[in-house]
């Protein structure tokens, strides 16, 4: 077992070394990863939580691509001037190039393809991937009559469909959500829902997003005690309620710790005067 661990450590160390190299740029020592390799190379690194981008010319000169603010508080876009200076004239415009990894990859790959007929594109097409998650938490069932604002346990599972891009923005999900009864609130529900997720903040290992459930199939059951009897009522409903919520994913290893602030409001449902209290914590991993 110890030998196996040692071998794995060596392999991981080798993979890490092969993925990036040490360079000295303007007196600064940096570990840079080569993203595009051609007549013009694209290198990058994250330093103190910030992305930094570099190009390497055919004579091994490394130049940083910068975008600083001037006295007028406007970005100077120096990186466009740097790109224009190191490229030969192939009629390529830098006007629409942004200082992001995706935009730089597209542009430099296009330049290499134009300047070298033997160059083969190094862009990877984004593919769909599946993420499976589980979660649990509490809810006050904001769309159900609950005059005492009682909290109930909730748990569930979710299958998310998302691109494998470096910083994906859009995704869809299929969710199963089970609400258990509270001793003082005899209400339970099983909900299947389809939804959409938009990532407003997508940095490093953290993404913060908004959710909307646009279709739900709900099986609910409530027990009502009267003076003469105990009545158990069941209901099945299919709705397009457009339920909105917030969430966050934090990448840990090969998976994500998830947090949800759910059921904030809906276009077609009443919150019954209770402020939504619906929090979940979970974990999801890539299939």
Image (cartoon, helix red, strand yellow):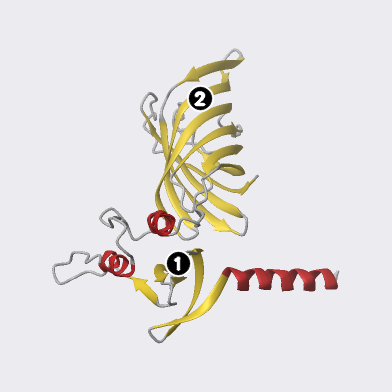
Q: Position of residue 24 (x, y in %)?
A: 45, 83
Q: Is residue 114 visible?
A: yes
Question: Closer to us: mark 2 or mark 1?
Answer: 1
Badge 2 local density, few (<14 within 10 Å), some, or many (20+)?
Answer: many
**What is the distance, in whole Å, between disc 2 and disc 1 at their CAs?**
49 Å
Q: Position of residue 167 (x, y in %)?
A: 46, 52
Quarter holding residue 110: bottom left
Residue depicted at 56% across the width and 16% down the height: 235
Q: Earlier in the sequence, mark 2 or mark 1?
A: 1
Q: Nearer the viewer, residue 231 or 134?
A: 134
Q: Is residue 188 visible?
A: no
Query: Mark 1: which secondary structure?
Result: strand
Query: Mark 2: which secondary structure?
Result: strand
Label 2–label 1 contact, CB within 8 A: no
Q: Position of residue 10 (x, y in %)?
A: 73, 73
Up/down of 223 relative to 95, above or below: above
The disc label shown at residue 41, or none: 1
Badge 1 local density, few (<14 within 10 Å), some, or many (20+)?
Answer: many
Drawn side of residue 204 relative to residue 107, left or right: right
Quarter holding residue 236: top right
Up/down of 282 relative to 269, above or below: below
Residue depicted at 41% across the width and 28% down the height: 242
The disc label shown at residue 216, or none: 2
Q: Nearer the viewer, residue 256 or 79?
A: 79
Drawn side of residue 85 relative to residue 247, left or right: left
Q: Nearer the viewer, residue 287 or 126?
A: 126
Give the quadrant of the C terminus: top right
Q: Residue furthest bottom?
A: 27
Q: Position of residue 116 (x, y in %)?
A: 44, 59
Q: Residue furthest front?
A: 117
């Amino acid at each position: 077992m110890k030998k196996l661990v040692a071998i794995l450590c060596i392999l991981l160390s080798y993979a890490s070394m092969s993925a990036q190299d040490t360079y000295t740029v303007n007196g600064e020592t940096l570990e840079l990863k080569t993203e595009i390799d051609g007549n013009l190379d694209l290198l990058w690194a994250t330093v103190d939580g910030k992305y930094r981008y570099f190009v390497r010319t055919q004579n091994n000169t490394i130049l940083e691509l910068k975008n600083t603010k001037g006295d007028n508080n406007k970005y100077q876009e120096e990186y466009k001037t740097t790109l224009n200076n190191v490229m030969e004239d192939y009629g390529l415009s830098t006007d629409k190039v942004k200082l992001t990894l995706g935009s730089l990859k597209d542009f430099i790959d296009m330049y290499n393809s134009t300047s070298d007929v033997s160059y083969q594109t190094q862009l990877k097409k984004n593919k769909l991937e599946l993420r499976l998650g589980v979660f649990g938490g509490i809810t006050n069932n904001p769309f159900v009559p609950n005059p005492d604002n009682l909290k109930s346990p909730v748990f569930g599972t979710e299958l998310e469909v998302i691109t494998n891009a470096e910083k994906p923005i859009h995704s869809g999900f299929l969710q199963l959500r089970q609400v258990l009864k509270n001793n003082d609130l005899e209400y339970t529900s099983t909900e299947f829902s389809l939804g959409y997720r938009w990532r407003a903040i997508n940095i490093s290992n953290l993404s913060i997003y908004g959710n909307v459930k646009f279709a739900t199939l709900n099986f609910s059951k409530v027990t009502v005690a009267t003076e003469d009897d105990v009545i158990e009522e069941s209901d099945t409903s299919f709705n397009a309620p457009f339920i909105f919520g917030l969430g966050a994913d934090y990448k840990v290893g090969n998976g994500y710790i998830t947090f949800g602030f759910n059921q904030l409001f809906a276009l077609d449902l009443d919150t019954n005067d209770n402020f939504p209290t619906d929090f979940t914590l979970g974990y999801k991993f890539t299939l």
